[in-house]
Image (cartoon, rainbow, N blue to C red):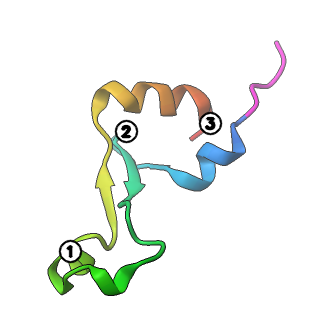
Amino acid sequence: MPKLKTNKSIRKRFKVTKNGKVLSPKSKRRHMMADRSSKMKRQSRGWHVVDKTDAHRVKKSLPYG
């Protein structure tokens, strides 16, 4: 059976934890940051857990993740 291909664009955007949770970086951090409050900028740092309904699709694209 041939090897499965990893979707490279998804690999760059998501990561899978040891326990199988899918993490993604928080959104709204690219531009127009001067208009946002300090609280919103601070809370949008780091990673957040993807909902399990979407995590299934991400894991399918990362067969060896």
Q: Main secondary structure of the magenta part?
A: loop
Q: Nearer the viewer, mark 2 or mark 1?
A: 1
Residue at label 2?
Answer: 20
Q: Image check: 29 left or right of 65? A: left
Please provide percent x and percent y for residue 59. Answer: 50, 31
Q: Residues within 10 Å of mark 2 (few under 14, many from 20)?
A: few
Q: Image check: 50 left or right of 14? A: left
Q: Amino acid at mark 1?
A: Met
Q: Mark 1 to mark 3: distance in Å?
A: 34 Å
Q: Does the residue at mark 2 contact the one at mark 3 (Cβ under 8 Å)?
A: no
Element assignment for label 2: loop
Q: Which mark is residue 40?
A: 1
Residue at label 3?
Answer: 64
**Residue at left offset 62%, top offset 36%:** 64
Looking at the rendered image, the quarter that the C terminus falls into is top right
Looking at the rendered image, the quarter that the N terminus falls into is top right
Q: Residues within 10 Å of mark 3 (few under 14, many from 20)?
A: few
Query: Sequence order check: which comes first, mark 2 or mark 1?
Result: 2
Which quadrant of the view contains residue 42? bottom left
Is residue 3 covered in magenta?
A: yes
Please provide percent x and percent y for residue 31. Answer: 47, 76
Q: Amino acid at mark 2?
A: Gly
Is residue 24 covered in magenta?
A: no
Q: Give, as a single range, the part of the protein colored magenta.
A: 1-5
